[in-house]
Image (cartoon, rainbow, N blue to C red):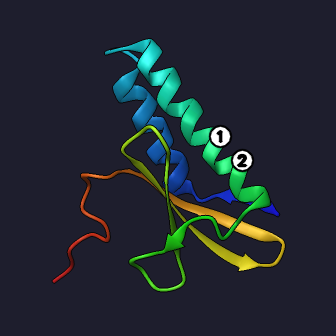
Amino acid sequence: MNVYFTPTAKTDLTQLKDYLEPRNAIASHKQLSAIATSIRMLETFPLIGKEGRVLDTRELVVPGTKYIVVYAILSPESLYILRVLHGAEMYPPFED
């Protein structure tokens, strides 16, 4: 399974690193490493996450963290990481 990142997911990871790194470099490394490990698991076990709150998505809670990887399986060969969110973030966003 090929894993691709949407621009939004890349931004999520950059913002996470930018927020955590100056506060605690060790914690930043641990959190990002745990997220990366979970995403690598999706290459082999794409159905490991639960059905998502948004149609046709899945969500994987990253073990040992409060982060959630939101992804979509678009074909038997491709999986897209849509978002990487802290569990306290409102998702999906509230819309009028």
Q: Secondary structure at mark 1?
A: helix
Q: Position of residue 56 (x, y in %)?
A: 54, 84
Q: Residue at x 51, y 71 (%)?
A: 50
Q: Residue at x 40, y 27 (%)?
A: 18
Q: Residue at x 15, y 83 (%)?
A: 96
Residue under numbered circle 2: 40
Looking at the rendered image, the quarter that the N terminus falls into is: bottom right
Q: Secondary structure at mark 2?
A: helix
- Circle 2 residues within 10 Å: few <14, some 14–19, many ≥20: some
Q: Is residue 82 left or right of residue 3?
A: left
Q: Position of residue 87 (x, y in %)?
A: 31, 52
- Marks 2 and 1, how far apart in space? 5 Å
Q: Which mark is residue 14?
A: none
Q: Nearer the viewer, residue 45 or 93?
A: 45
User: Is residue 38 shown above or below 7?
Assistant: above
| Name of the residue lying farthest toward the left | 96
Q: Is residue 75 left or right of residue 10?
A: right
The amino acid type found where label 1 is placed reads Thr
Q: Is residue 13 left or right of residue 91?
A: right
Residue 20 sits in which quadrant? top left
Q: Nearer the viewer, residue 64 or 17?
A: 64
Q: How many marks?
A: 2
The amino acid type found where label 2 is placed reads Arg
Q: Position of residue 53 (x, y in %)?
A: 38, 77
Residue 33 sits in which quadrant? top right
User: Is residue 39 shown above or below 58?
Assistant: above
Q: Nearer the viewer, residue 58 or 48?
A: 48
Residue under numbered circle 1: 37
Marks 2 and 1 close (CB-CB < 8 Å): yes
Q: Position of residue 44 (x, y in %)?
A: 79, 58
